Image (cartoon, helix red, strand yellow):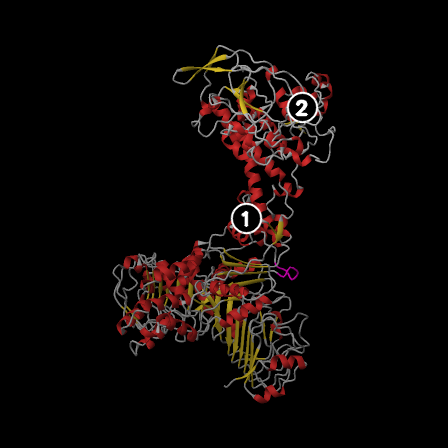
Amino acid sequence: MTHGITPVADNILEQRSSFIDSSSSSPVADPRWPLLNRWSASSPTKISPTKPPQTVTISDDQGSRSQVSVTAVALVPSSPLGLFSSPNPISDNHISNNPIPVKEISLAEVSRDLVSPQARGVHASALLPLVNGHDESSVTSTQALATPSTIEHQIPSPSVSKRAWDKPLPIVSNSQWPTVKVVEHQSTTTLASGSTNSDLAALKAHSKDYPWATKMNPSQRNLHRVTIPEHMEDGTPMVRIPSHVLLGGTSSASKILPSPSGTTNSRINNSPTLVLSKETPTSKQVSPLITQTEHNIRRISWLWRQPWKSSRLSEMIYQEGSQERRIGLQRLAEIKVWLNKVVTIENRVNGLITHRDVQLQRLCLCGFCSKSLISSYRYGKSVFLTLMEVEKLKSEVFDVIADQAQIPEVQERQLQPTIVGQDTMLEKAWKHLKEDGVGLMGLYGMGGVGKTTLLTQLNNKFSGVKCGFDFVIWVVASKELHIEKIQDEITQKVSLVDEKWKQKDQRQKADVIYNFLKKKRFVLFLDDIWEKVDLTEIGVPFPTTRNRCKVAFTTRSQDVCAHVGVEDPMEVQCLGENEAFDLFQKKVGKTTLGSDPEIPYLAKIVARKCSGLPLALNVIGETMSCKRTVQEWHHAIEVLTSYAAEFSGMEDKILPLLKYSYDNLKEEHVKFCLLYCALFPEDDHIPKQKLIDYWICEGLINGSKDIEKAENKGYEIIGSLVRASLLMEQVNWEKQDIVSMHDVVREMALWIASDLGIQKEAIIVHAGVGLDKMPKVENWNVVSRMSLIRTNIAHLAGRPECLALTTLLLQNGCFAKISSGFFKSMPKLVVLDLSANHELFELPGISELVSLQYLNLSSTGIHHLPMGLQELKELIHLDLEETPRLASVVGISSLHNLKVLKLSPSCFTWDHDTMQELKTLEKLETLSIGIDLLSNLENFFSSHRLTSCTRSLKIWDINMESSGIVLPTTMEKLFKFIIGDSRISEIKISPLHNLKNLSKVLIQNCKCLKELTLLMFAPNLKDLHVVDASQLEDIINKEKACESVPFPKLIYLTLCNLPELGNIYWSPLPLPCLKQIDVAICPNLKKLPLDSQSGMHGEKGLVIRYREKTWIEAVEWHDEATKTRFLSSCEQVSV
C-alpha cells in the first residue's frame, strides 16, 4: 500500500497530474524532482506506539482553565516518499473506490515557545486544505503526518471572532506537547508490488550536492519537493504557498476538494486530510501570513526585477502611449487597465520594500511570532496579497496591445439661429482656406463684428466634408494667453492626455504635441487671440505646402496677424445698411414691427445707430422686441443719441466687451489718444494731422524737442489704433488721410471717459446734434473737455466757471459772437478750435487763456490778429489758413514759443517788415505759407531759416517765363507744393538734393510750363494733380530724366485739359501703389505708362476714369495682355 499527499493546484501551482504519464508502468527518476530521486518506493511509514495520555490545561482571557486529555503519537523517521506524491505515474487501478472509515489518532506534543527542529515534518502549506465537517465514515487513510507548523499555518474558520489573531495564546500544560486530532484514513487499496524505503539519514549524505537545501528548515525543504524548484539569485529555491492554504481556512477546504464518495480517478480525492479537533484553539494560533513574511517579500523583490513576458509591455509601463499614437494606433482598453494595475502595484511594492527592515525586526522565535502581532499580521497579509497580484501580472501575455486609432469626428459647434450677411464672407474665407498654398489664415475685426461666428461656420463645414484631415481642433485662446492651457486643450482633442501629462512642463508638452502632429494632417482653429502666438511654443508644426495643415484664428488686431505670419489677413467688416436692418428686424420680431405703422420707420433709425455691428443689433433688437408703442421707440432714439450707455443692455452686454480692446492697449497715453477721438461727431472724418496736433498740444505726445518726431509718433499711434480695430482708416474726397470711429466704439470711449458713467459731466459732447444753445451743466468745475462741433449756437454768452477745462472744440458751427467774459474762467484751457465759423470776426477776451497752446482760426472771418494774442506766451500752434479777410499778421513776432504757423493760403500781401517778423520766430519748426509776387518769393527763398521749416508752399501770380524757378536745396521738409496762375516755363531743383517729403503737387493754370521732370526727385509723391497747362508736353522729359524709376508711391494721378501732353513716361512703369488715373481733355495722350504687371499691389486694382469715349478708344496699349487687364477697369465719368 502506498500513501501520498498531492498538492492542490491553484492560480500559482500547476496541476501535477498534467506531468504524469499514465502509460508508464515502472517508476522512472524524474529530473524535475532531484531530492525525490534519493529514495525508492518503500513500505508505509511506521507509527510508534503511543505514549501515555497527556493532560493539557488551557486558559482563556477571563482566567478560567480547563483540562483536556489527548493521545500523542511518535514519529519514526523514514523515507519521505511515503508522505508525498511521486512524480512517477500511478495507475488508477491502484486506488480503491470503497468507503473508508475514519478514526482519531494523537500527535506529539508541541512546545508553545520553541518548535523542535527534529519534530518538524512537512510544512502545513504543502498539505491539502483542511476539511471540516466531513462525515468521519467517508474519509480514510492509513497514515498521516502532523507537526506544530500545521497549527501555526492554520487560518481560523469564519466562526472565530474578529481579530482572533490579536489575542495571545494562553496554553498551560504539564507536558511538552499540546494535543490535536488527526483523522486516520484506512484504505483497502494495495500496490501490485511493495518497495523498500531507505533511511531518512540518506538526505544528509548528499547535502554537499545540494548546498541550498541546508539553508532551508526541514518543513520548507520537504515542501520544496512537491513544488516547482524556482531559484533565487543566490541559488536558494523559492517556495510558493498555495493561496487556498493561507487564506482558505477550514471553511473553504470543502469547496476545493471533491467528496471522497465521488469520482476517485484523481489521487487528490484519496489524499490524507488533516482536521483540527474541536478542542484545538485555532483562533489562537499564529498566522502563516507572519511566518512567511520574509520569504514573500524576498520573492516580491526578486520577481519585480525580472523581465516581463513581453518586452513591449515593459517599455509601455514608462511611456504615455506616444509611440503608438505617432503611428496612428491606440492602446486596447485591457492594456490600459493592465498598465494602471502595474503602476498601482509598483507603488505598493516600493512601499512594502521600504518598510521591510522595520517589519522583519519585529519578528521573533525564528519568524514564528512577532513583538507586534497586529502590525506584523497586517504587513504579512499585504505582502502576500501583493505577491499574488505581482505573479498574476507577470504571467499575463497579450497578443495585441494596440489597434488602429479611429479618426475622431469633427465636433460641430452651436451657432446662433439668426445669422445674416455673412454668406459672402463665409464663401470667401472657405475658398481661401481650402487653397493648397494657404496654411495660415487670420480673421480680424472689431469686437462683436462676428469673427467667432464666421470661424464657427468654417469649423462646422469640416463636419460635413471629407477633406482628408486627421484632426479638426477648436481652441479658445481668450484674452489672457496661457500657452499651457492651449496645449491642454489640444491634447484633450487628440486624446494625448494621460496620468503623467500634468507633471510635464511647457517645453515637454510642446515636444509631445509636435511629435504627434508632425505626421498628421490637421486643422487648428484658434479663437480670440489678443497677442502674438508662437506655434513653436505650443508645439504645433508650422503649416506648409508639404504637410498641408491649416491654422485659422480670429483676433481684433492686425498686429497679431503679422506676428503669427499671415501676410494677407481677412477683415470681418460690419454689415451693410440693408443686411443690418434685416438682422435687426429678425431680433425685434414681426409682432412688434406690426404693432404700429410708424414703428418700422423708427426701427430703421434705431438700427442705423448700431452702424452695422451685429453685437449691437442683436442686443438692442432683443431689447426693443417688447416695445410696442411709438413713445417707447422715440425714447430709445433719444437715449441712444444723447448718452447711449444708459440704454438697456449697453453697460452689461456691449460696452464691456468692446472695452477689452481698450484695456489691451499697452500704453496709457495711447488710451487717452483714443478717448480724444470720441470728442468728434458720429461718423465724422477726422484728419490725421489735426488729431496729432491736438495730441501734441494736450501733452499726450511729447513735442517739446522736435515737432516732426512728435508727428511721426502720432502717426504710429493712429496706426496702432487702426490695427487694433478701434479706428477706421479712410481717404476723403480731398484725398486727405483721415480716420473715423465706429459709433458703438465711440459710445464705449465716452463711457470710459466719464469714469464708466459715474462722472458724466467730466466730458461734455454735443457734437453734430443740432444744438442751438449752450448745454445745461450742473457743475462746470468738473468739466475737462467739451465738444460743441457742428451746432447751431450763434452766441457764446455767460461766464462759465470751467476751472478744469483743457479742450474746447467749437468748429464747424454758427458762432458769430462771443462774450468778452466767456474765456475769463478757463485758466487751464490748452486747445481751442474755432475753425470754419465763417461769421466769426472778433475774438474778445482771448488774452485770459494764459495756458493756451493750440489756437485754430482757419476759415473764419477775422480781419486781423485778435487783440491780446501777444499775451499767449504758451502758444505753440497757430492756424490762420483760409482766412481771406485777414489783411496782416503784424505783431506775430511776440509769440516767442510758436512752433507751428499756418498761413497758406491767405490773401494778405507780404512786405519786407512782415517777412522780417517771421524770421525772428526762433522756435518755428513748421511753416505753411503762400506768396504771390516774385519779389516776395525771392525774399522768401533767400531766408534759410524760413525755407528749412516750410511744409506747405503755395505760389501764384509769378512771372518767370524765361528762366523758370529753382527750389532751394533747403526745402527738404516740403510736403505740399501748389503753383497757380503763373507763367513759369520750368521748375528746377539741384540734382544733388531731393524732395524726400513731397507728397502732394498741384499745378493749375500754368500756361508756359513744358515739363515736370523735377518730380523724378520726389520718391514719396502720392498725389499729382495737373490742370490747365496748355503747353505741357511731358510729365517726365526723357532727355532730362535720371536713372531712378519715378512714382514708386504714386496713388492718384489727375490730368485735365492738357492739349499738348503726349507722354507721361516713355516706357511702362511698375506703379505698385497706383489706384486711380483721371484723364480729361488730353487728346494727344495715346499711351499710358502701363503693362500687364503695373499696379499689381493695389488693394482693389487700378481704376482708369475718362471723360471722352473717343479717347479710350484711341489708347494704344502696350500689348494685348495690358489691354485685357485694364480695359475692363475703365470708367467713363461726367464733368
Decide: is 1012 above or below 726.
below
Assign a secondary structure to mark 1: loop
Quadrant in which residue 1 is drawn: top right
The residue under label 2 is which amino acid type?
Leu
Quadrant in which residue 219 is drawn: top right
Q: Is residue 843 visible?
A: no
The residue at which mark 1 appears reads as: 497
Categorize mark 2 by other alpha carbons within 10 Å: few (<14), some (14-19), many (20+). many
The residue at which mark 2 appears reads as: 81
Q: What segment is highlighted magenta in the picture?
A: 543-548
Q: Is residue 671 visible?
A: yes
Decide: is 115 above or below 31.
above
> In the rendering, at what x and y percent does residue 716 appear?
50, 60
* Most foreground residue, 1135 or 538: 538
Decide: is 608 above or below 38.
below
Check residue 488 for magenta coloring.
no
* Most foreground residue, 594 or 624: 594
At 30% from the left and 69% from the top, the residue drawn is 626
> In the rendering, at what x and y percent does residue 45 appear?
64, 19
Left or right placement of residue 675 versus residue 94 in this view: left
* Most foreground residue, 708 or 179: 179
The residue under label 1 is which amino acid type?
Val
* Most foreground residue, 741 or 293: 293
Left or right placement of residue 299 versus residue 591 in this view: right
Instruction: Give the number of the mark in front: 2 or 1.
Output: 2
Q: Gap in Å between the C-alphas at discs 2 and 1?
A: 60 Å
Assign a secondary structure to mark 2: helix
Nearer-N-terminus badge (2/1) = 2
* Magenta stretch, main secondary structure class: loop
